[in-house]
Image (cartoon, rainbow, N blue to C red):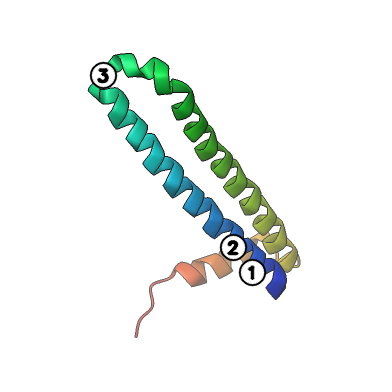
Amino acid sequence: MNDKFKTHLEEAITNIHDDRKIAAELLQDVAEYIGKNKERHKDVGQVAAKYLETLQRSNEQLVKLTGMLQKTYDKEFEGLTPGDKESLYDHLEAPKND
């Protein structure tokens, strides 16, 4: 994976996490506002829906990025057999004895 792609990927993931944090905080504010009086739901229900849409979009973005990374990973290890990959995984997961 080249450095420019890696930098953009890290930036995108950071932005996704930041957007999720902000949307979750705003959604929590709306929930508290509605919690004080259920009649308020009609006033801010659309706003809450927009925050939920933002969270859903960020999930979709993470899934797409994961797919891109999986394709990159698969290309890097395409010469390995499934047994080789499993052995490598087992080696990485094995407890280390110092």
Residue at 48% across, 23% down: 46
Q: CA distance from mark 2 to mark 3?
A: 40 Å
Residue lying at the far left of the rendered structure = 36
Callout 1 environment at 10 Å: few (<14), some (14 to 19), or many (20+)?
few
Q: Quadrant of the N terminus?
A: bottom right
Mark 3: which amino acid? Asn
Tell whether label 2 touches label 1 (CB within 8 Å). Answer: yes
In the depicted structure, whether residue 56 falls above or below residue 61: above
Label 3 sits on a secondary structure element that is loop
Front one among 92 and 45:
45
Give the residue number, with chain letter if any, for mark 1: 7
Residue 72 spot, x, y in % from top left: 71, 62
In the depicted structure, whether residue 76 falls above or below residue 35: below
Give the residue number, with chain letter if any, for mark 2: 11
Residue lying at the far bottom of the rendered structure = 98
Callout 2 environment at 10 Å: few (<14), some (14 to 19), or many (20+)?
few
The numbered dot on residue 37 is: 3
Mark 2: which amino acid? Glu
